[in-house]
Image: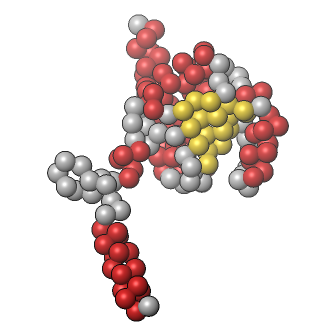
Amino acid sequence: MRFRVCIALLSLGVAQFSWEQTNASSKPEIAEKAALGPPDTLAVIGATADQEASLRSQIQVMHPEVLPLRILFVPHWKYLDAARAFQLHVPTGFGSLMFTHLPSRTVYIDNDRYMGTEWLGHWMAHELGHLASNSAKEEDAERAAREFRKRLKQSLLAKSR
């Protein structure tokens, strides 16, 4: 019995050092860097082809440090269900048309209340602000969203010239 316990402890101790992935230089790979990738690696589910193309181009222009893993366009009833399941807290005086679940890096968009590509860019910048600041606070998200919106505006101005 004692021998089995020693073997189990030894194998758990050795396994602890092999849990990290390494790159060619044998340095541990940071999980955040590994999770980041080009916008085509994020999954857009439930969007029309136009919505998806617009969303991907806007995210590419905004160039956030942290990308969402999934963006879900869902019907209103499913949006309300997800908001209830994740216990979404909406500040007084605000409405909720999309929200970000930070632990899973998933953005939920109420497809029944979708109002066009400019609306999508404005509010996606806000949701990317939540991810960039890693905060559920609206003020932190808006602070980070200003830079994303500025990039979108500069891109639109450059295209119009």
Specify whether residue 137 is in view: yes
- Residue 46, placed above or below residue 96: above
Q: Nearer the viewer, residue 115 or 158?
A: 115
Specify whether residue 139 is in view: no
Determine the residue positioned at 40% across, 85% down. Answer: 4
The single residue placed furthest to the left in the displayed view is: 25
Please state the horizontal and vertical placement of residue 114, each as a whole percent of the image: 71, 25
Tell me where residue 30 sits by quadrant.
bottom left
Please state the horizontal and vertical placement of residue 130, each as a whole percent of the image: 54, 47
- Residue 158, placed above or below residue 85: above
Asked if residue 101 lies left or right of residue 66, the reply is right
Q: What is the image's colouring?
A: secondary structure
Determine the residue positioned at 62% across, 30% down. Answer: 45
Please state the horizontal and vertical placement of residue 112, each as a whole percent of the image: 77, 27
Count the marks.
0
Determine the residue positioned at 27% across, 57% down. Answer: 28
The single residue placed furthest to the top in the displayed view is: 161
Quadrant housing the N terminus: bottom left
Determine the residue positioned at 59% across, 53% down. Answer: 136
Q: Nearer the viewer, residue 146 or 22?
A: 22
Asked if residue 39 lies left or right of residue 100, the reply is left
Please state the horizontal and vertical placement of residue 17, each as a whole percent of the image: 30, 68
Quadrant housing the C terminus: top left
